[in-house]
Image (cartoon, rainbow, N blue to C red):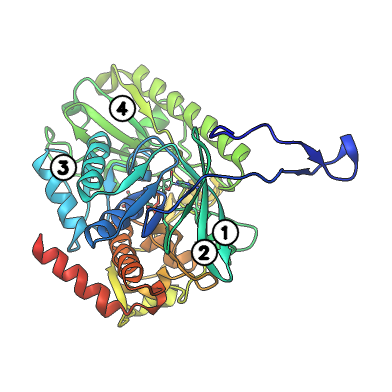
Amino acid sequence: MGALGGPGVARALEGGENSKVFVEPERELPMVRDADVIVCGAGPAGVSAAITAARAGAKVRLFEWRGCLGGVWTAGLLGWLIDFDKPGLTAELKRHLTERGLNRGGSESNLCYDPEGMKLLLEELCAEAGVMFQLHTKVSAAFKEGNRLTTIVTESKSGREAWRAPVFIDTTGDGDLGALAGCAFEIGEAEDCPCQPMSLNALLVCKDVGLLGDFVRYNETAEEGKSNSDKKDLFRAEIERAGHFPSYSKPTLWQIRDNLLLVMMNHEYGVKPFDAAAVTAATVRARAELHRIVNGLRALGGGWEGLQIAATAEQIGVRDGRRIRGRYVVSAEDLKTGARHEDGVTRATFAVDIHALSAEHNKKAGYTNRGIKTQPYDIPLRALLARDVEGLMMAGRCISGDFIAHSSYRVTGNAVAMGEAAGVTAAIAAATKRLPHEVDWKEGAAKLAAMRQRG
Ligand SMILES: Cc1cc2nc3c(=O)[nH]c(=O)nc-3n(C[C@H](O)[C@H](O)[C@H](O)COP(=O)(O)OP(=O)(O)OC[C@H]3O[C@@H](n4cnc5c(N)ncnc54)[C@H](O)[C@@H]3O)c2cc1C
């Protein structure tokens, strides 16, 4: 049988031709057992987990569905790093971006970067660390022995393949692996999922960024003086002047370099992230809105003359996915009180950031913090350890937390720090034949500190 398998014998359940259920035939898959740690999803959290586990001595496999590493950073054309003033890989990434001339503006904590350059950088860092990464490969099934996750199945042009390892990390953003393995999870604010909206970002080119200084953040050729909030409001007024009220009422333009800009200016409301047809429709609507706005701005002339979309993102940005239930749930209370934990793996500082949940909300405000004042708070390792399944960790936006806390910790500086913590813990667990929850964070923290000192 080839890698794609044979056709199998189709069998419908009772009901014959009218059956609404199809029983997939059993088949044998090739099984690979060459990794200590398998990381599923290569966004900011996944690449950080994989690089860190590999640097800690583990053999690491990293699977990514899209055609590049980086997740929302790259396939999502994000363009803006938040809560990035941390030691370790965040500092290292900033150093590399600066050396390559790929970042601009902002502060130590928040800065703009070039998504195309980020793709190359992440591939180089993963290759250097010895991470075995595979693109275009979707994690599609998970199997346990007892309560321990032991095997995953991927789908790709190579067909269905099984992969076995002692430790797995779910960094799919959407919590796919945790859900496939049977973990409890939550989505959005309540059961019927009022979720944060999705946004499709885009790269734009303009003729002379110097003429757009009132609207563009970190515009090196224009005089600064207007606040970022002023710039968003002025940009929205221009979009309205061009005849359209944007579905994100705080649209933002960043200068990547020269006349290359990044834009976030749309919201898609109430889209369930696990409904492929709904996500497709949202992507199509969002792309049409982006083109409508850019065509309208171009028609205004002046500084907007010649404005064009260079590329829309491959992946619409999903803010809210599954939050896999862990051994601790990071909560709104933690943010309000500035929680401290002995197993704190990073200290998050970003504010509560809930984007409008409907078009009606958007007319009043593009986003809100609901009056919650965030104190810097710890994310404990327990929030990265699946409660219901052994041998499984999470990092990034699918960790264990409530809706409000997620709206703060989801930004990418925290995703990187969580990835490092999960990566080092998984590597120690695999090397010492323990489960991740049996590894004390003191061991992980000491190993990370030693690795950072070695450079
Ligand atoms: C529109 C938008 C704007 C945002 N703005 C900012 C901002 O300005 N600054 C900031 O720092 N953060 C921002 N965030 C938040 C941040 O980008 C995300 O929360 C962050 O990317 C989380 O990182 P992650 O690695 O957990 O997930 P992701 O970046 O979503 O990465 C998950 C990866 O897993 C892959 N994957 C998913 N399922 C599977 C599967 N079954 N098999 C294999 N691979 C899979 C995906 O393709 C993806 O590459 C924004 C998010 C969105 C959506």
For marks 3 and 1, the one nearer the N-term is 3
Q: Residue 298: x percent and y percent?
A: 34, 19
For marks 1 and 4, the one nearer the N-term is 1
Find numbered disc 1 in the image and state the secondary structure of the residue it sits on. strand
Amino acid marked by disc 2? Leu
Q: What residue appears at the point 28 percent right and 41 percent down from the top-left corner?
A: 79
Find numbered disc 3 in the image and state the secondary structure of the residue it sits on. strand
Q: What residue appears at the point 36 percent right and 60 percent down from the top-left corner?
A: 36
Label 3, label 1: how far apart the Cα atoms are: 44 Å
Task: Specify the quadrant of the image occupied by residue 438.
Answer: bottom left
- Determine whether label 2 and label 4 are within 8 Å by CB: no
Q: Is residue 40 above or below residue 340?
A: above
Q: Is residue 103 left or right of residue 444?
A: left
For marks 2 and 1, the one nearer the N-term is 1
Find numbered disc 2 in the image and state the secondary structure of the residue it sits on. strand
Outermost residue, front side:
1
Quick check: can you spot residue 244?
yes
Graded by Cα atoms within 10 Å as few (under 14), some (14 to 19) or many (20 or more), the crowding at tag 2 reads: many
- Determine whether label 2 and label 1 are within 8 Å by CB: yes
For marks 2 and 3, the one nearer the N-term is 3
Question: Which residue does the numbered mark 4 point to in the structure image?
Answer: 204
